[in-house]
Image (cartoon, helix red, strand yellow):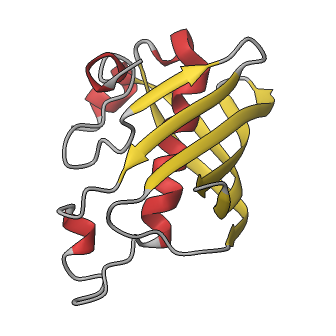
Amino acid sequence: MKREEIKTYIPHREPMLLVDEINIDENHVAHATYKVRGDEFFLQGHFPDFPVVPGVILCEIMAQSCSLLVGDFLKGKTPFYAGIDKARFKSSVYPGDLIEITAKIVNRRSMVFFIEAVAKVKEKICVQANLSFALVDNADLEQRK
Protein backbone atom coordinates (compact mmCIF):
# COMPACT_ATOMS: atom_id res chain seq x y z
CA MET A 1 0.00 0.00 0.00
CA LYS A 2 1.38 3.40 -1.02
CA ARG A 3 0.75 6.90 0.43
CA GLU A 4 -2.53 7.64 -1.37
CA GLU A 5 -4.11 4.39 -0.20
CA ILE A 6 -2.68 4.88 3.30
CA LYS A 7 -4.61 8.18 3.43
CA THR A 8 -7.87 6.24 3.09
CA TYR A 9 -7.15 4.57 6.45
CA ILE A 10 -5.47 7.15 8.68
CA PRO A 11 -6.25 10.88 8.99
CA HIS A 12 -2.64 12.07 8.80
CA ARG A 13 -1.71 14.36 5.93
CA GLU A 14 1.44 16.14 4.86
CA PRO A 15 3.57 17.20 6.60
CA MET A 16 2.58 14.66 9.31
CA LEU A 17 2.03 11.61 7.08
CA LEU A 18 5.16 9.63 7.92
CA VAL A 19 4.64 6.31 6.14
CA ASP A 20 5.59 5.98 2.48
CA GLU A 21 4.65 2.35 2.00
CA ILE A 22 3.34 -0.57 4.05
CA ASN A 23 2.70 -4.23 3.52
CA ILE A 24 1.08 -6.58 6.00
CA ASP A 25 2.22 -10.19 5.63
CA GLU A 26 0.29 -13.43 6.14
CA ASN A 27 1.34 -13.48 9.83
CA HIS A 28 -0.27 -10.02 10.35
CA VAL A 29 3.12 -8.32 10.71
CA ALA A 30 3.41 -4.82 9.27
CA HIS A 31 6.46 -3.93 7.21
CA ALA A 32 6.54 -0.19 6.54
CA THR A 33 9.05 2.33 5.23
CA TYR A 34 9.69 6.04 5.43
CA LYS A 35 12.50 7.78 3.55
CA VAL A 36 13.91 10.81 5.40
CA ARG A 37 14.17 13.39 2.63
CA GLY A 38 15.96 16.06 4.63
CA ASP A 39 13.46 18.87 4.10
CA GLU A 40 11.02 17.75 6.82
CA PHE A 41 9.79 20.41 9.26
CA PHE A 42 11.14 18.48 12.26
CA LEU A 43 14.70 18.63 10.94
CA GLN A 44 14.76 22.42 10.54
CA GLY A 45 15.80 23.08 14.12
CA HIS A 46 16.87 19.62 15.29
CA PHE A 47 19.76 20.36 15.04
CA PRO A 48 21.11 23.19 12.88
CA ASP A 49 24.12 21.98 10.88
CA PHE A 50 23.58 18.41 12.19
CA PRO A 51 20.01 17.26 11.41
CA VAL A 52 18.83 14.23 13.39
CA VAL A 53 15.29 12.80 13.39
CA PRO A 54 13.82 13.41 16.87
CA GLY A 55 12.94 10.35 18.94
CA VAL A 56 9.31 11.40 19.26
CA ILE A 57 9.06 11.53 15.47
CA LEU A 58 10.52 8.02 15.24
CA CYS A 59 7.79 6.91 17.66
CA GLU A 60 5.19 8.66 15.50
CA ILE A 61 6.49 6.90 12.39
CA MET A 62 6.12 3.58 14.21
CA ALA A 63 2.65 4.53 15.52
CA GLN A 64 1.32 5.37 12.07
CA SER A 65 2.64 2.04 10.80
CA CYS A 66 1.05 0.27 13.76
CA SER A 67 -2.33 1.87 13.27
CA LEU A 68 -2.48 0.48 9.75
CA LEU A 69 -2.24 -3.01 11.24
CA VAL A 70 -5.81 -2.83 12.50
CA GLY A 71 -7.12 -2.27 8.97
CA ASP A 72 -10.90 -2.21 8.76
CA PHE A 73 -11.25 -1.39 12.47
CA LEU A 74 -10.04 2.11 11.49
CA LYS A 75 -13.13 2.84 9.36
CA GLY A 76 -15.05 5.62 11.04
CA LYS A 77 -12.48 5.92 13.82
CA THR A 78 -9.29 7.86 14.60
CA PRO A 79 -6.29 6.26 16.34
CA PHE A 80 -4.93 8.03 19.43
CA TYR A 81 -1.85 7.13 21.44
CA ALA A 82 -2.69 5.42 24.72
CA GLY A 83 0.88 4.65 25.74
CA ILE A 84 4.53 4.27 24.84
CA ASP A 85 6.28 1.67 26.98
CA LYS A 86 9.82 0.34 27.07
CA ALA A 87 11.00 2.75 24.36
CA ARG A 88 14.71 2.33 23.70
CA PHE A 89 16.62 4.55 21.30
CA LYS A 90 19.65 2.69 19.96
CA SER A 91 21.00 4.81 17.10
CA SER A 92 20.31 8.10 15.31
CA VAL A 93 18.47 8.59 12.04
CA TYR A 94 19.65 11.17 9.48
CA PRO A 95 18.51 12.72 6.19
CA GLY A 96 18.74 10.19 3.40
CA ASP A 97 18.08 7.20 5.68
CA LEU A 98 15.38 4.69 4.80
CA ILE A 99 13.58 3.71 8.00
CA GLU A 100 12.14 0.19 7.99
CA ILE A 101 9.43 -0.49 10.55
CA THR A 102 8.22 -3.89 11.69
CA ALA A 103 5.19 -4.11 13.95
CA LYS A 104 2.79 -6.71 15.27
CA ILE A 105 -0.27 -6.69 17.50
CA VAL A 106 0.39 -8.56 20.75
CA ASN A 107 -2.90 -7.87 22.54
CA ARG A 108 -6.24 -6.19 22.15
CA ARG A 109 -8.89 -5.06 24.62
CA SER A 110 -11.99 -3.79 22.87
CA MET A 111 -10.76 -0.88 20.70
CA VAL A 112 -7.37 -0.57 22.45
CA PHE A 113 -4.49 -2.25 20.63
CA PHE A 114 -1.07 -3.18 22.06
CA ILE A 115 1.74 -3.43 19.54
CA GLU A 116 5.44 -4.25 19.52
CA ALA A 117 7.36 -2.14 17.02
CA VAL A 118 10.95 -1.83 15.84
CA ALA A 119 12.46 0.74 13.48
CA LYS A 120 15.74 0.00 11.70
CA VAL A 121 18.07 1.67 9.24
CA LYS A 122 20.27 -0.72 7.24
CA GLU A 123 19.35 -3.60 9.60
CA LYS A 124 20.52 -1.60 12.63
CA ILE A 125 17.88 -0.98 15.31
CA CYS A 126 17.19 2.72 15.85
CA VAL A 127 14.24 2.46 18.22
CA GLN A 128 12.01 -0.22 19.66
CA ALA A 129 8.94 0.18 21.84
CA ASN A 130 5.64 -1.26 22.98
CA LEU A 131 2.94 1.08 21.75
CA SER A 132 -0.73 1.17 22.57
CA PHE A 133 -3.47 3.21 21.02
CA ALA A 134 -7.22 3.53 21.22
CA LEU A 135 -9.60 3.91 18.32
CA VAL A 136 -12.10 6.71 18.94
CA ASP A 137 -15.33 7.01 16.95
CA ASN A 138 -15.22 9.99 14.60
CA ALA A 139 -18.75 10.89 15.71
CA ASP A 140 -17.40 11.43 19.24
CA LEU A 141 -14.68 13.68 17.85
CA GLU A 142 -17.23 15.79 15.96
CA GLN A 143 -18.94 16.59 19.27
CA ARG A 144 -15.68 18.03 20.61
CA LYS A 145 -15.26 20.60 17.84
In this rendering, the answer to whether 7 lies above or below 37 is above
> Is residue 105 or residue 127 the one in the foreground?
127
Question: How many marks do you count on the picture?
Answer: 0
Look at 17% across and 62% down and name the residue there: 39
> Is residue 59 or residue 74 the one in the foreground?
59
List x then y, in percent, for residue 16: 27, 48
List x then y, in percent, for residue 122: 58, 56
In this rendering, the answer to whether 29 lies above or below 114 is above
Classify residue 39 as left or right of residue 46: left
Quadrant assignment for the C terminus: top left
Residue 37 figure quarter = bottom left
> Is residue 140 or residue 63 the one in the foreground?
63
In this rendering, the answer to whether 103 lies above or below 51 is above
Classify residue 32 as left or right of residue 48: right
List x then y, in percent, for residue 63: 53, 45
Look at 30% across and 26% down and name the residue there: 3
Quadrant assignment for the N terminus: top left
In this rendering, the answer to whether 99 lies above or below 90 is above
List x then y, in percent, for residue 108: 77, 28
Look at 39% across and 38% down and name the residue there: 19
> Outermost residue toward the right?
106
> Outermost residue toward the front?
122
Look at 61% across and 19% down and name the residue there: 24
Classify residue 29 as left or right of residue 1: right
